[in-house]
Amino acid sequence: MSSPALQQPQWPDRDRLKAVVSGLEGLPPLVLAAECDQLKERLASVARGEAFVLQGGDCAETFAGTTADAVRGKFQTLLQMAVVLTYAASVPVVKVGRMAGQFGKPRSAPTEIREGLELPVYRGDAVNDIEFTAAARTPDPGRLLRAYHCASATLNLCRSLASGGYAGLRQVHAWNQDFVAGSPAGQRYEQLAQEIDRAIAFMHACGADPRELGAVEFYSSHEALLLAYEQALTRTDPRTGQAYDLSAHLLWIGERTRDPRGAHVEFARQIANPIAVKIGPDAAADDVLDLIDALDPDQRPGRLTLTTRMGARRIRQALPPLVEKVAASRSPVVWVCDPMHGNTVEAASGHKTRNFDDVLDEVAGFFEVHRALGTYPGGIHIEFTGDDVTECTGGGHNIAESDLGHRYETACDPRLNRGQSLDLAFRVADLYRSHLGPGPGA
Ligand code: PEP
Ligand code: MN
């Protein structure tokens, strides 16, 4: 028996919860088991050092944010980042949205006090509303159904964008149109897009017109936090008899719920999806080996991703002992860097923020550690939006702490805006190229 599930809402109306769960059980899955297997294959190629994962989206998706513009903006930014990495680093990029299901949030305290009033903390739109009133903060099971429908609408648009011609490489300029003029990152992108045009024209002139240029593979992911929702969308695959959580292609377990004997790990053991686990700076190597034993005892490449989130100041000391022990165990995990969650600080204005240079420095540390140990830096996991928000400081437009109030819209953690995301993609492409270059002694 595993211990009780952490981070679950106190649903006041258990009968309503039961009714919602049985409603969800009767609804169609959002993804197919075969697609989850295909992502596992892609991640296996990452484990072998042949591809790079780009995973990202909002910290917390919201129902109000489920609009065509917002979803397209995120999808388009992810595509632009992927194109920069594919072209500038010459590596295939596995594109995974932190989208279409990221509606639940783990929190550090169960309640929040404002001016003497204590209310349940906001746990994501799938649970309650962010507004600070007793009614809004009361967990409402009906929200799980709304989360399903918003996830469905989001994924539907992403699937159309991925396959309907919009994502084809001939559109590299179109994705940038509303953006290029005012932005240094947009201008740098435009140059790269011109080079891609020339490469495509060259291939075309040679008689090659590969189908791969006309569409992209896009996968969805979120934290498997709210177990009632995840269990309700878990189905047995008739091909193999195995269970899959068909709410998303990839599910991850957060830093707060990754106890190897806890309920979240127990749930993940039972599903055949690719799984990721967040690993913070205080994790001991033996904790990580326990997680590997629990989640990937058969060492199947692509099954398990370890997403480290150490903070720029700690990654160079905290990561090497983990990577060394895991490498010695010969476990074929994918290593991904989340350079966001270890770098959150509070600005003088009270806004939660992250500095672009810290984000970049953590990614640089990640590459350094893997290079020193001869292991493969498999990807990045970021929080971003396609909108021009002012939530993280620094980057091309050098957003200052005093700018944070201009457009601070996140429902939870601060996200990179579109320019900062593109900036990051160029810098990561540089790091990737030099990672593959001659070693320090060469
Ligand atoms: C998150 O990804 O939003 C999150 C809460 O991360 P972590 O579990 O790494 O703290
Ligand atoms: Mn977050």
Image (cartoon, rainbow, N blue to C red):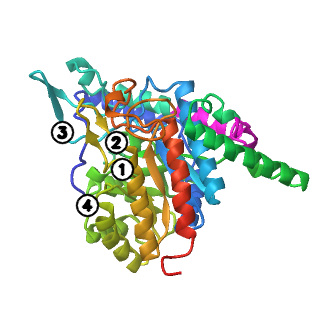
Q: Position of residue 102 (x, y in %)?
A: 42, 38
Query: Which of the two discs, 1 and 4, labels the residue nearer the N terminus?
Result: 4
| Residue type beneath disc 4 | Arg
Q: CA distance from mark 3 to mark 1?
A: 26 Å
Which residue bears the numbered disc 3? 109
**In-front residue for pair 302/267:** 302
Q: CA distance from mark 2 to mark 3?
A: 21 Å
Residue positioned 50% across, 30% down in the render:
387
Residue positioned 47% across, 54% down in the render:
380
Query: Which of the two discs, 2 and 3, labels the residue nearer the N terminus?
Result: 3
Say which of marks 3 and 4 sits in front: 3
Query: Which of the two discs, 3 and 4, labels the residue nearer the N terminus?
Result: 3
* 151 vs 227: above or below: above
Which residue bears the numbered disc 2? 354
197 to the left or right of 276? right
**In-front residue for pair 6/66:** 66
Kindly identify which numbered label has been placed on residue 261: 4
Would you say residue 163 sits in the magenta stretch?
A: yes
| Residue type beneath disc 1 | Asp
Which residue bears the numbered disc 1? 358
Examine the rendering and report whether any part of residue 239 can be seen: no
Q: CA distance from mark 2 to mark 1?
A: 7 Å
Q: CA distance from mark 1 to mark 4?
A: 33 Å
**In-front residue for pair 45/104:** 45
- Magenta part of the chain: 152-173
Q: Quadrant of the N terminus?
A: bottom left
